[in-house]
Image (spheres, rainbow, N blue to C red):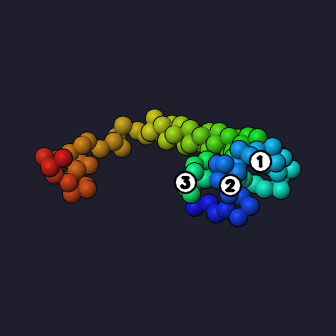
Amino acid sequence: MVSYTQNELLSITDFTKSISKVLGSLKEHSVEKVGVLKNNKLQAVVISTDEYERLKELEELMNNIEHKEIYETVQNRIDTPKSDYLSIDDMAKKLNVNINDL
């Protein structure tokens, strides 16, 4: 869970009144994020464009890593000789599972 300092939380009313100041603080990196509260509940988080772009790059990197792992799994399966395959009946026996219960 993300924690916020007192100066990182604003009511929606205070946020709208001081949006220029908030954006300046984000741009200057004097605050990392600003949580916007409505009825004392966090409704949104405002971050700088630099931070947003960094997060998007991380997301893309994580997706690429996941795609690479999937690709490698598929390649390993392709390279597995058919003689190493198990039938569903053999797998059920190996795992002590009754296929009729599935």
Percent of width and height locating residue 4: 67, 62
Q: Residue at x 73, y 40 (%)?
A: 53
Residue visible at 61% across and 53% down in the picture: 37
Q: Nearer the viewer, residue 102 or 24?
A: 24
For the question of whether residue 72 can be seen, the reply is no
Tell me whether the residue at label 3 lies in contact with that at label 2, contact meaning CB atoms closer than 8 angstroms.
no
Three-letter amino acid code of the residue under disc 2: Leu
Q: Which residue is mark 1?
A: 18
Q: Nearer the viewer, residue 28 or 73?
A: 28
Residue highlighted by disc 2 = 10
Where is mark 3, residue-wise? 39
Mark 1 surroundings: few (<14), some (14-19) or many (≥20) residues within 10 A: few
Furthest toward the right, the residue is 28
Q: Earlier in the sequence, mark 3 or mark 2?
A: 2
Residue 55 locus on image (x, y percent): 69, 45
Amino acid at pointer 1: Ser
Disc 1 is placed on an element classified as loop
Q: Are marks 1 and 3 in contact (CB under 8 Å)?
A: no
- Label 3's element? loop
Instruction: Return the x and y of residue 6 as percentages of the image width and height.
Output: 70, 64
Residue type at mark 3: give it: Asn
Residue count near mark 2 (Cα–Cα under 10 Å), binned few <14, some 14–19, many ≥20: some
Mark 2 in CB contact with mark 1 (< 8 angstroms):
yes
